[in-house]
Image (cartoon, helix red, strand yellow):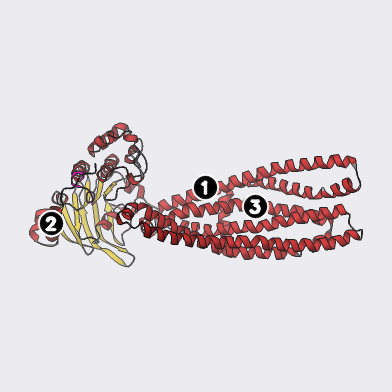
Amino acid sequence: MKKSYRLYLRILRYVRPYTGELIAATLAMIGVAAMTALSALIIKNVLDDVFIAGDRRMLLLVPAAIIVIYVFKGIFRYARTYVMSWAGLKVVRDIRNELYEHLHRLSMSFFTETPTGVLMSRVTYDVSMMQMAITEALVGVFRDVFTICGLAGVVFYRNVELGLISLVGFPLAFYPLVRFGKRMKKASRRSQEQMGAMSKLMQERISGAGLIKASGTEAAELEEFKLENEKLVRSFLKIERVKALSNPVMELIGAASVALIIWIGGLTVINGKMTVGEFFSFLAALMLLYEPVKHLTSVNNVIQQGLAAAERVFDLLDISPQIADAPDAVEIPRSKGHIVFEKVSFSYGQDRVLKDIDLDIAPGTRLAIVGASGGGKTTLVNLIPRFYDVTEGRITVDGYDVRRVTQNSLRKQISIVSQEVVLFNDTIGNNISYGITDVSEGQLTGALRAAYALDFVNSLPDGYDTMIGERGARLSGGQRQRLSIARALLKDSPVLILDEATSSLDTESEHLVQKALENLVHGRTTLTIAHRISTVKDADRIIVISGGRIVESGKHDELLKAGGEYSRLYSLLVEEDLSDEPRSTGD
């Protein structure tokens, strides 16, 4: 209960900016409650004055009063529903914006460990459930509470004794409210977790559609999807079971209470202590009173679903970024590209990946990094832009400890071209200029020309405005890689990281990309995770990483003569290149 209360309070903090709208909606809700109470009060006049006393003047006034009551009730109801829904949607918009912003503040390690589908489920499904809860809570709960207060006033105004008797059923009515609410929250939590699992499965399988088709595993994948889908259906059925049970229980309690009141009230009318109109006015108010009480159960079910979603959303918001700017972080000026590793070690949990790395990279140096797979090459370069923080030691760029400068200013100094090219479902122009402001067409043309991409871009029907599909699906591998090089050229950073940028390309594409890379690396400090012989031989310096340590360092000829680990790896590269037959280009 305390946990739910804390969740309510946390949600209310998001509601606070819209206090003015809530006050206006509250006044409208009071208006609706007042009109509902008046509609119960007027029943006495309908029965006693019109049908029993035969008052012709009242015959004209009562229908007119009913029309006026329901006109104002409709106006107040519209204002209440629209304003409260508006406030609820704005609150959820703010939560979703904060959640999305928070996700981009989290460290790379978080995204490595958390499936994309699960995150998508949090941002879309869970926040949508919160939206329903906030809207229903703001509109439903306040509406029902005001209506209950108004109708309770009519009940006690008509007959205090019968009013007190009618209250006997209220504790029974609120018991299922609490009981069903707990069950609903538990079932909702399970359904949201299952929705996350299903989103994860769909994201992975849709992105891997090519492999599935090539492997002929569509039937097996369908069976796995059906299994997850069945789990999701079962979790939602538990929710529907609670919903389906709550209303009949509430109606039974209400019916029993009304039956008791009819019996006692009938005796009161027969004994002449109430008129027929007074009793039916009392009974109408009582029956109208049980409707909002019953509705509170339905609203509470939605709120409990929202609270379960809020727990998951706030759990995500409460994750602290592992990489954050220091309080005294400074902006690093444009770098010369002097990078130094001082006794650097790094661990993933208990697994120590890098050990005592000492490395001084002079400005403009072309450094090749070689080593067996899993040796720590990519981890080494990812420490420079602070995708991860060193466990021991420090890294400096032009003498600045990377942990003492702002992440934004640090990452402006670095361009990354990797094997996995990141492109968005947008135009070529927007993809190349991503993250760069005030880019002219001339600058785009220059970057594309230097990246050997201008010809193929100009051959496209819409040129720079061509939509390239999700992850650049409408382009070949070589074309995608050259666009990423054009983007790096346009960014014009003094430090360049090449992470096996040509390893998955065919021979012709690789030739064009290599020519583009020659333009890109000129005048920059370049760290290349080497895959091809040409990359290794042309480097100013080569380091060999094995077991998380730098075991050799020097120029190509020197390391070959030494006959150590580099010589062995180089022989493997030669064999690999010789075994690669020319492949047709996808350009």
In the rendered structure, does residue 506 fall within the stretch colored magenta?
Answer: yes
Q: Check disc 2 and give the amino acid type.
A: Glu
**Which of the marked residues, 1 or 2, is nearer the chain's N terminus?**
1
Q: Check disc 1 and give the amino acid type.
A: Arg
The span shown in magenta is 500-509
Q: Check disc 3 and give the amino acid type.
A: Gly
**Residue identified by numbered label 1:** 93
**Residue identified by numbered label 2:** 575
State the residue lying farthest toward the bottom: 350
Res. 140 mark:
3
In the rendered structure, does residue 441 fall within the stretch colored magenta?
Answer: no
Q: Is residue 15 left or right of residue 200?
A: right
Q: Main secondary structure of the magenta part?
A: loop
561 or 34: nearer the eye? 34
State the residue lying farthest toward the left: 561
Q: Secondary structure at mark 1?
A: helix
Q: Secondary structure at mark 3?
A: helix
Q: Is residue 119 left or right of residue 567?
A: right
